[in-house]
Image (spheres, helix red, strand yellow):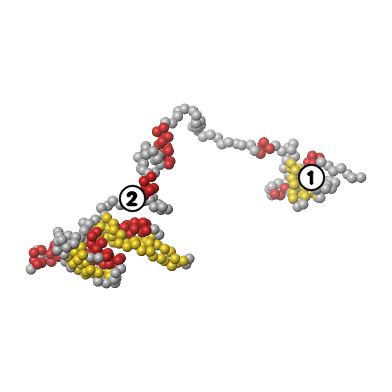
Amino acid sequence: MATKAPSLTQLSTTSFSLHHTPLSYPKLPFTPQLKPFNFTSFSSKTTHPPSHLTFCTKKDEIDITFFNNDQYNSDESLAFDPPEKPEGFIPPRAIDEPPFESEEEVARAYEELYGPAYSGETFLGKDVFVMDSKIKKESGFGSKAKKEKIRDGFEESVVQVRRVTKVVKGGKQLKFRAIVVVGDKKGQVGVGCAKAKEVISAVQKAATDARRNIVTVPMTKYLTFPHRVEADYGAARVMLRPAAPGTGVIAGGAVRTVLEMAGVENALGKQLGSNNALNNARATVVAVQSMRQFSEVARERGIPMEELWK
């Protein structure tokens, strides 16, 4: 005659001892083997099982732990112990309690976090034209916002823009090289060269480089050179000569651009060597640096300036 299997409630109320052989239970269809619970996983010093655990069965290599609902209290394990409030704690007021913030206070807080509003009103003295639509229209597609030009009295002139490639491990890198001449047309001039991935960025970088290399061009009251000179830079060679008033600048290429940005109105220039624009521009700068005024020569010799023409 088949024996009736005990229920789970009957099994959970059954006690056992760690130091004795476990009680024998009738074999259940879903419990092939019963064994005492191994409490070494809780702590190495534990010698007695917790009060809320009764025993553990093993089915298909899976341990199943049964809890005693009478002794296990779920509220105790989930108890929340909030920290103590510090001295002088003032609870925050609700959002619908007075006093309410004024519109100006809200606008100041908004501007401090996100900047000036699109309406153009500012309470902290910030730039109200940051979100101006005109700036967006002036900027190129896919590029950053257009930067304002430096107002230092210098004018810029682009001499040449070329595409250059650099062979790297993964292929070729395409960039743009720009040659820019800056000057105030009052005797100050500079030549700069830079490369970038965009033409606008290359021109801006070249203009910055030119401002770092400003030189002074000696000129007479007729806006021409004090004397003739020749200079070279690399394979480029440049010849400069003074001219009478009304002659104008008779030169070509980068030499003409450098002389015009320097403010020279009457001069003759000639490229005698290479046609490279960068080398000719720098050769022109070297030539004007080697020039000296008559007053400087007379001062070095210790004679009056009229003696130089005798």
Mark 2 or mark 1, whichever is nearer to me = 2
Q: Which mark is residue 300?
A: none
Picture quadrant where residue 253 is located? bottom left
Say if 280 sits above or below 150 in the image.
below
Q: Say whether residue 187 is visible.
A: no
Say if 165 sits above or below 115 in the image.
below
Circle 2: element type: loop
Q: Nearer the viewer, residue 6 or 207?
A: 207
Residue where numbered disc 2 is placed? 148
Circle 1: element type: loop
Identify the residue shown where x is 32% and y is 57%.
208
Residue where numbered disc 1 is placed? 17
Q: Say which amino acid is labelled 2.
A: Glu
The image shows residue 234 at horizontal and vertical percentages of 29, 70
- Residue found farthest to the right: 1
The image shows residue 263 at horizontal and vertical percentages of 21, 58
Q: Nearer the viewer, residue 266 or 96?
A: 266
Identify the residue shown where x is 40% and y is 40%.
118
